[in-house]
Amino acid sequence: MNALAEEINPALASRRFMSGNEAVARGVLESGARVATAYPGTPATEILEYLGTYDDIHANWSPNEKVSLEVAIGASMCGTRAFCAMKHVGMNVAADALITQTLAGVVGGLVIAIADDVGMSSSQN
């Protein structure tokens, strides 16, 4: 936040401007999630990068989307709130884990963020 904006409107001093991915990461933290996983792929990469800056959450990269989702599922089955992020084509890789999980349910809560690349700037559609 720059000083000029605060000078023009003092209410902005208590606010923070964030990108969409940074806001998602903040929401994950404030929701009480303690485990976050992802497979790097734009436009979802930055979510875990921001989560990695917080001390209260265990954030880790996975070798692929399926493993990432399985780690988050495991945490949620143990009673921990968990988060998993990937780009839209990655859900094809993680589909087996997702379909199987629908039968078992979760205990701690599980959120899966699928980032879509509408303009095809970094992936196929």
Image (spheres, grey):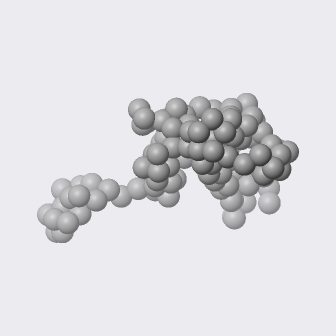
Which percent across, then down, holds residue 78? Answer: 63, 35
Count the labels in the image. Answer: 0
User: Which of the pair 70/94 is nearer the observer?
Assistant: 70
Which percent across, then down, holds residue 122? Answer: 70, 52
**Residue 93, placed above or below residue 19:** above
**Residue 29, placed above or below residue 71:** below
Q: Is residue 83 left or right of residue 122?
A: left
Taking the spot 69% from the left edge, 64% from the top edge, the residue there is: 119
Taking the spot 41% from the left edge, 56% from the top edge, the residue there is: 18
**Residue 81, placed above or below residue 114:** above
Name the outermost residue toward the bottom. 9
Query: Can residue 69 be seen in the rendering of this structure?
Result: yes
User: Which of the pair 119/21 is nearer the observer?
Assistant: 21
Which percent across, then down, holds residue 43? Answer: 62, 52
User: Which of the pair 9/100 is nearer the observer?
Assistant: 100
Taking the spot 46% from the left edge, 45% from the top edge, the residue there is: 32
Which percent across, then down, holds residue 14? Answer: 23, 58
Q: Is residue 76 left or right of residue 12?
A: right
Q: Quadrant of the C terminus?
A: bottom right
Quarter-wise, where is residue 7 in the image?
bottom left
Q: Is residue 14 left or right of residue 118?
A: left
Quarter-wise, where is residue 68 in the image?
top right
Taking the spot 77% from the left edge, 46% from the top edge, the residue there is: 104
Query: Can residue 122 be seen in the rendering of this structure?
Result: no
Q: Is residue 3 left or right of residue 35?
A: left
Q: Quadrant of the N terminus?
A: bottom left
**Residue 58, placed above or below residue 89:** above
